[in-house]
Image: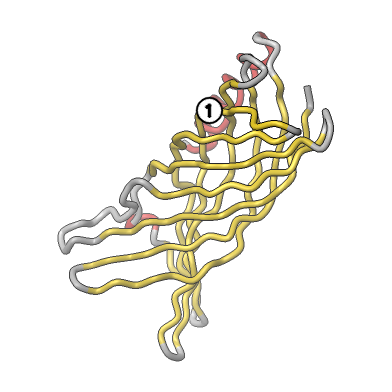
Amino acid sequence: MFKKILFVATLAITTIGVSAQTKIGVKGGLSFASAKYTAGTSTETFNSIVTPNFGLTVDFPGSKSFNIQSGVFYSGMGGKLTEGSYSATTNLNYLSIPVLAKFAIGSGFSGYAGPQLSFLLSAKDKYSGGTDDIKDQVNGTGLFGVFGLNYEINDKFNLFGEYTAGFSNLAKTTTNGEKWNANAFSIGVGVNLK
């Protein structure tokens, strides 16, 4: 199912991008992801883990100071929980589609912000004794907010730093007030293809 979503989304964005003469590119880097889980009166804060992020970017036409940017991305969320001698790493992998307002700041810098809809691809807990699939405990979709800064080195390459904040509760079960929020800080490099 997710392969179909990825294919359709990539095809749609690429087709629109080509027909509208937009900028198409790729970007990728590393995310420092963390999470917070609450159930009843108990709260667990997850330490950061490093995950990859990469995907296709599409900059739609606009003015010199403002335009809309979208794309299709693989993005990782999660964190590491340590309690005494026990530790476990939670990895949440998503197919993400943002819709961002991008605005020029000056001297090659631009900022961007907007919502991102993410579709869960996999969810696993890894610990010394093995691995558990926890996909049935996590909502299939999540709403995030993306806030970033971009610097164009030249017409071909750019650098970015962005913060992704979890707006929706990722916990599927909420009978005991369960709440699971994830966020990440990412850095990386972008390449303009067209």
Residue 178 horizontal side relative to residue 93, left or right: left
Frontmost residue, 71 versus 120: 71
Q: Which residue is rendered at x = 43% and y = 68% of the image? A: 132
Q: Position of residue 51 (x, y in %)?
A: 61, 58
- Which residue lies most toward the front here? 106
Q: Which residue is rendered at x = 18% and y = 69% of the image? A: 40
165 lies above or below 37: above
- Which residue lies most toward the top here? 19
Q: Position of residue 157 (x, y in %)?
A: 81, 36
Residue 119 horizontal side relative to residue 148, left or right: left
124 lies above or below 5: below
The residue tagged with tag 1: helix, strand or loop? Answer: strand
Three-letter residue code for mark 1: Ala
Residue 189 horizontal side relative to residue 181, left or right: right
Q: Quadrant of the C terminus?
A: top right
Q: Which residue is rendered at x = 50% and y = 41% of the image? A: 146
Q: Position of residue 119 (x, y in %)?
A: 45, 41
Q: Which residue is rendered at x = 28% and y = 66% of the image? A: 38
- Which residue lies most toward the bottom here? 85
Q: Position of residue 78 (x, y in %)?
A: 48, 61
- Residue 131 in view of the camera: no
Residue 171 horizontal side relative to residue 49, left or right: left
Residue on which disc 1 sits = 101
Q: Which color scheme does this rendered protein use?
A: secondary structure
Number of other residues with Cα within 10 Å of mark 1, as a class: few under 14, some 14 to 19, many 20 or more:
some
- Residue 92 in view of the camera: yes
Frontmost residue, 48 versus 76: 48
Frontmost residue, 170 versus 183: 183
- Tell how many labels: 1
